[in-house]
Each structure stands twice: as C-alpha cells, then as structure tokens.
Image: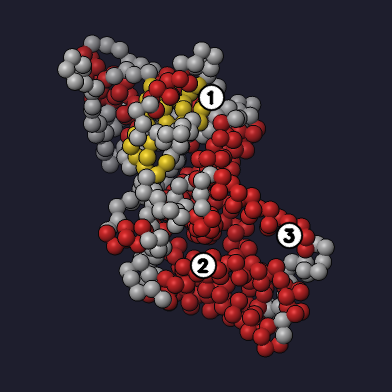
C-alpha cells in the first residue's frame, strides 16, 4: 500500500550437521525465535503449523485484549486458539475435528488457570521465551547468522530453560507446562468466527500415526522430570495437574480397552460368565455405568454441534486409536525408557491422491496400507466375529435362554464390537477398490484370529 511499509517476511533455514542433533521441530522453532528477536523484536509470537492458516484478521486483536488487560496482562503467558478444520465430512468419518476437546474440555481447562499449549494457533509473549537483543544493523546481521548455526545452542539454556523444550515429540505441551510452572497463566479463546483453519487427516493411517505420535510424546512427558504431579507440585493447581494427565495418560487406555475387547469375548465361547446375571441386582451398576457413560458422551457431542452418526464414527475411531496407536505408543515409550529405542519425530502426511479424496468425501474408511496397526484391528474384529458366530450357533442349536441369562452382558459387548467394526469387515471381504484391506493383512488377521480362538477353546476349561 502506498505510504505504508510492508511487513518483513524472512525465510529461515537452520544449519544442520550430522554431528549436532537438530532437535526436530523444537530446534527450528527456537532458531526462529532467536532470529526474529533481532529482525522484528516484536512483543508477541504467533505459532501456526504449515497446514493451517488464519481465517480472521481479528485474531491478533483478540489476543491483544488479553495481553493488554489492565488486571491480568502481567500474568498471561500465552493465548491458545482452538484447532478448527475446513474439509471435514458431515459425519467426520475419522473424528478429525477433536470436537469435544475444543468445545468442552478446553473450556474447563480455561477455568483452572488456563489450558495446555497445543502448539499451533497460539500467541506467546516473547519475554517468556527469550530476551530481546539490541545492537547496530551490522551487529544484528552477524548475530542472526550465529543464531541460525547448528552450534549456537551448545552448552546454553536453550531447550532446557529457555525457548521450546527439547526431548519430547510434543514439545509444545512440555513448553506450555514449563511456562505455567514459572508462574504464568494461559487463556483459551474460542471465538464465534473461527480464527484458524487447518487440514484434518483424510485416511485412517494418517489418523492413527498422528495420534501415535501425540500420545507417545504425552506419555514421555508423564514419565519424565516434567511430570505435572511433581514438576508442577505447588506451582500449578492439583486440578490443572489432573487436566494435563487426562491427555498425558492416553496410551495407558490401551490396556483396559484391549482387555474388554478380548477377555469377555474369549470366555464367551467357553461358556464362562464374567459379569453378573441379568436377573441379579449386581447387574444394575454395570448397566448404569454403561448407559450413563454413553448417554453423556452423546450429549456432549451433540452439544458441540455434532451429529449422531458423527458420534458413532467417533466411537469407532476411539476404539481403533486405543487398540493400535495408544498400544504402540505405550510400548515404544517403555522401550525408550530402558534405552532400547530412540526418540523420533514422525510427520503426519496430509497429501492424498484423487481416489482417496473421493472415498473420504463419501465417508468410506481407507484401509489401503499394510500397517501393523491394521493387522491388530482386523485380528480383534475377526476374533469377536468368530466368537459371536460360535455362541449364536450354540443358542440356535441348544436353546438360548440360559445363555442370555448368564452371559447377557458379554454377548451385548461382543455384538457391539461386531457392529462397530462393520466397515472393517466390508474392507476385508467385500470391497474391491484400492481402499480395501490389503490381502496380506487379511490373511494374517484371519490366521491370528483363528489361532487365538482355537487355542483358547482347547486350553481353557469351561
């Protein structure tokens, strides 16, 4: 514009050398923070991922309202906006919107000294990240080259006490926790007009890989010196510590979920009851917990402007994440703790071909990869299907009143797992497109499921 100075845009390429670890995204972010301190010296820093963009020119003004508040401006360390997504399907086949988290859970976080930092769509005060550098133009130019070098951070506080924290795949969560433990508070602001839009995963593989990285990084924080319970002791409230652990302990959900997906079903084919009889009063607590949990979950999802079918898809993806992504994250984290695995940073690919995009728009699940995660999912689904067929055959042949009375809850659980896995069975045996389950995964899962059911039938006495 005539008479106005255009904003400065600088592309920074950090120096990388084999003998110096670059610390992945956190290392690049810290280099940007350091170099920007001598280019613009701006008081605020906005972090936006490469697959997200600003959709509201008022987001900066909204953030400034918190940073310039007369009563709380000296306490606010960062303002977190929600992640929203543009190309979601009507019923969110992969649950990519994180709808309940951004519309319900983070608002609860906001009432307890503020939410965690989730990286993108976040405004930070520069003073909480590093000190501003001053000098002449020549001095600043030379300093910028030094800051972008691979050796500048050696033996410094960067990544430990200053800037984004190193050592975690989710550096944003660890950094946000450190900021809050230093006495700063955060704000969660979810305006009516969406401030930032991004791209959600459009295949099941993308979804599972993304959540594997998130949950693995979260669990590493819980098992590290940054665990909220002791790092945040007397620094942040106990409620806020619990709020963090709601996400940091995601991988631990894999164990009870796997138990409920396998043990009741396998004992079903041997006629062994694990739950109270339907006629027993002890049946009521189980029924109450199951009904109230899912009614409340559905109510939250619908209140967040979701659909009933979208909620059902969310339950399916929830099951798949817990029995694959979280399981691998749990195992990999434990291996890292004992030194048998190294830290890695897996980038979630967001580029798909036209056929995959068309199936996504039609809300057809994509199973085109020979992933070990798919082998686990298919094995569990087939195991439940085989057990249900075996039990129903027994009911038809021998009369089922006693079976329903003794093992009604187990049969309902098995039926629910079979119904929720119906798209997976279709991908295994019906579909002919490229998004179907690969043949090698189908053969392995059928073999594993058959072996498990057969061995359990002969080894466990009824």
Distance of mark 3 from mark 2, alpha carbons? Answer: 23 Å
Outermost residue on the top side: it is 136
Residue positioned 42% across, 34% down in the render: 193
Distance of mark 3 from mark 1, alpha carbons? Answer: 40 Å
Q: How is the image coloured?
A: secondary structure
Where residue 217 is drawn, which disc sits there?
none
Q: Which residue bears the numbered disc 3?
A: 286
Give x and y (percent) for residue 170: 45, 41
Q: Which residue bears the numbered disc 1?
A: 185
Q: In which quadrant of the rendered view does residue 236 lie?
A: top right
Residue positioned 64% across, 53% down in the render: 295
Q: Which residue bears the numbered disc 2?
A: 421
**SS at mark 3 in the image:** helix
**SS at mark 2 in the image:** loop
Residue 388 showing in the rendered view = yes
Q: Which is nearer the N-term, disc 3 or disc 2?
A: 3
Give x and y (percent) for residue 359: 35, 62
Q: In which quadrant of the rendered view does residue 389 lie?
A: bottom right
Q: Which is nearer the N-term, disc 1 or disc 2?
A: 1
Give x and y (percent) for residue 2: 16, 17
């Amino acid at each position: 514009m005539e008479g106005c100075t255009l904003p400065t845009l600088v592309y920074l390429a950090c120096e990388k050398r084999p003998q110096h670890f670059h610390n992945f995204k956190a290392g690049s972010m810290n280099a940007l923070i350091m170099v920007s301190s001598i280019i613009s010296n701006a008081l605020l820093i906005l972090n936006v991922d490469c697959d997200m963009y600003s959709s509201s020119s008022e987001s900066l003004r909204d953030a400034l309202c918190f940073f310039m508040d007369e009563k709380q401006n000296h306490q606010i360390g960062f303002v977190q906006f929600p992640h929203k997504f543009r190309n979601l399907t009507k019923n969110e086949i992969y649950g990519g919107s994180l709808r309940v988290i951004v519309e319900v859970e983070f608002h609860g976080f906001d009432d307890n000294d503020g939410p965690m930092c989730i990286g993108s769509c976040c405004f930070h005060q520069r003073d909480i990240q590093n000190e501003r550098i001053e000098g002449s133009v020549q001095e600043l130019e030379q300093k910028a080259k030094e800051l972008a070098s691979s050796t500048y951070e050696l033996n410094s506080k960067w990544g430990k006490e200053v800037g984004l924290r190193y050592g975690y795949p989710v550096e944003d969560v660890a950094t946000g926790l450190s900021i809050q433990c230093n006495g700063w508070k955060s704000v969660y602001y979810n305006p009516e007009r969406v401030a930032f839009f991004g791209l959600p995963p459009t295949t099941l593989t993308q979804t599972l890989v993304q959540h594997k990285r998130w949950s693995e990084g979260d669990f590493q924080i819980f098992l590290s010196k940054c665990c909220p319970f002791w790092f945040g002791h007397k620094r942040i409230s106990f409620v806020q510590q619990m709020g963090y652990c709601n996400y940091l302990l995601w991988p631990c959900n894999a164990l009870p979920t796997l138990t409920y997906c396998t043990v009741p079903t396998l004992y079903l084919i041997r006629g062994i009851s694990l739950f109270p009889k339907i006629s027993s009063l002890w049946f009521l607590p189980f029924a109450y917990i199951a009904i109230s949990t899912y009614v409340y979950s559905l109510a939250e999802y619908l209140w967040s402007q979701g659909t009933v079918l979208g909620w059902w898809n969310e339950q399916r993806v929830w099951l798949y994440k817990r029995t694959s992504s979280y399981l691998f994250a749990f195992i990999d984290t434990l291996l890292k703790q004992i030194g048998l695995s190294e830290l890695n940073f897996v980038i979630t690919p967001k580029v798909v071909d036209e056929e995959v995009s068309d199936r996504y728009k039609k809300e057809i699940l994509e199973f085109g990869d020979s992933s070990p995660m798919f082998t686990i999912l298919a094995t569990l689904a087939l195991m439940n299907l085989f057990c249900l067929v075996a039990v129903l055959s027994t009911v038809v042949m021998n009369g089922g009143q006693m079976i329903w009375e003794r093992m009604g809850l187990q049969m309902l659980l098995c039926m629910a797992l079979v119904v929720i896995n119906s798209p997976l069975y279709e991908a295994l045996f019906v579909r002919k497109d490229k998004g179907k389950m690969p043949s090698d995964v189908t053969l392995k899962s059928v073999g594993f499921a058959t072996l498990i059911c057969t061995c359990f039938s002969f080894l466990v006495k009824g």
